[in-house]
Image (cartoon, rainbow, N blue to C red):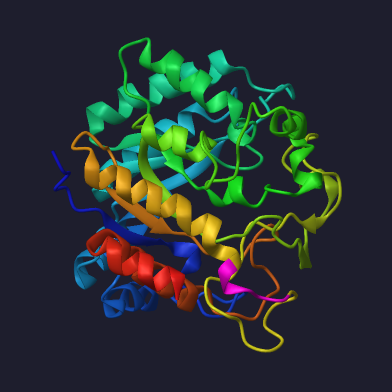
Amino acid sequence: MPNQSRVRIGIAEAGIRHEMSRPPPLDEQFRMIRDSEVFEYLDKTPSRQQVGEYAQLSERYGIPILAGGWWYTLGRDEAQLEDNLRIGATLGSLVHNVQIMMDHADGRLVTDAEVVEAYLRAYDIGAALGCLPAFEVHINMWSEDFRRVAEVACQVESRGIPFRLTLDHSHVIFKIGNERELAVFELDSAVAAGELVLDPFAPGSICARWIEAGWVAHSHARSTVPNNPRNVWARHASLAALPSSRHPRDLVGRGVQYPFVAPGEGEWHSAWHGNALEPWKEVMRQLVTYHRGHESSPLRLISTEFIPYPDYGEGAGYSLFANSLACARWIRVLLDHPAAAAAHAAA
């Protein structure tokens, strides 16, 4: 039976700006969301001290805060994860995006068993509160070794609990053909052996496998392209600030963001080609197609996430909000009129 559940499109707070280095006041951010007539919610987990302000603005502008998220180091941040789930529930969020850092607090790589236990604990807490966790595919996290996602998911499901994934496929697409990035976790050998398929147009691609398993409950939409250019206009402050010894050891941004619309002259460091976005768009098409065709699909929210940090857009001159709007409009057409969206993408 076709899925009749409407997927809502929101925006991550960091993308509600035109200038990379200068976000507008919070009141104006809510107004921008409302006036867009595209975005249906804000994606944000504020600090506990800010909850009241966000709740007041959410009510004033009629913009719910349906999703949020944060990153966590196991062995240190378990209490913060529980508190953020409670903050999300207080604000009416349906999902809390969980980024588990690849390194444990004691410096070693986290194990699958530890990720599974963190998931089960977060799920129990979230289910009681009404704000469920979704664990994200993301660089610098345990899931950057994409092969681990299915291992963890199957262990969770063996305990009788559904596995909920946040799919940010930009973190997969930018590694295609990227020797430097494929070397992280030795993914290059797995790709060469055909054990890991990153190309979404090829049979058995990793994103398609996650989608078809019914795990994707939340999506972050930030466009990128295969072998995405590194962000040469931004640098991390120091090697000590990088999240893991497994991170490529230099300061230049890794490059996980490609403008959705053509940047103006001098607004970006590289040539822009619209057709290069097709692999990223294809995964979004696959996700929407699966959702429309499966009543059991858990997908309810898609958050655009064009962001201003070193590995993403920092230093560029294009508008994050304009790119978020254009991407959201494309996704809305894809959700509501898939045939028209396919024709639009081919144009």
In the displayed structure, would residue 50 be above or below residue 1? below
Residue 242: in magenta span: no
Quadrant occupied by the C terminus: bottom left
Quadrant occupied by the N terminus: top left
**Start-end of magenta stretch:** 271-275
Q: Position of residue 156 (x, y in %)?
A: 41, 17
Q: Residue furthest top?
A: 159
Q: Is residue 24 visible?
A: no
Q: Quadrant of residue 251?
A: bottom right
> For this view, does 130 lie left or right of residue 67?
left
Tell me what residue is drawn at x 63 percent, y 36 percent: 144
Q: Residue furthest bottom?
A: 265
> For this view, does 226 lie left or right of residue 155?
right
Q: Is residue 145 visible?
A: yes
Residue sitting nearer the eye, 155 or 341: 341
Residue sitting nearer the eye, 90 or 256: 256
> For this view, does 49 lie left or right of residue 172?
left
Q: Position of residue 272 (x, y in %)?
A: 66, 75
Q: Position of residue 94 (x, y in %)?
A: 27, 43
Q: Quadrant of residue 265?
A: bottom right
Residue 272: in magenta span: yes
In the displayed structure, would residue 5 be above or below residue 193? below
Residue sitting nearer the eye, 53 or 98: 98
Tell me what residue is drawn at x 52 percent, y 71 percent: 260
Q: Position of residue 335 (x, y in %)?
A: 27, 59
**Magenta region's main secondary structure?**
loop
In the displayed structure, would residue 189 be above or below residue 43? above
> For this view, does 77 lie left or right of residue 48?
right
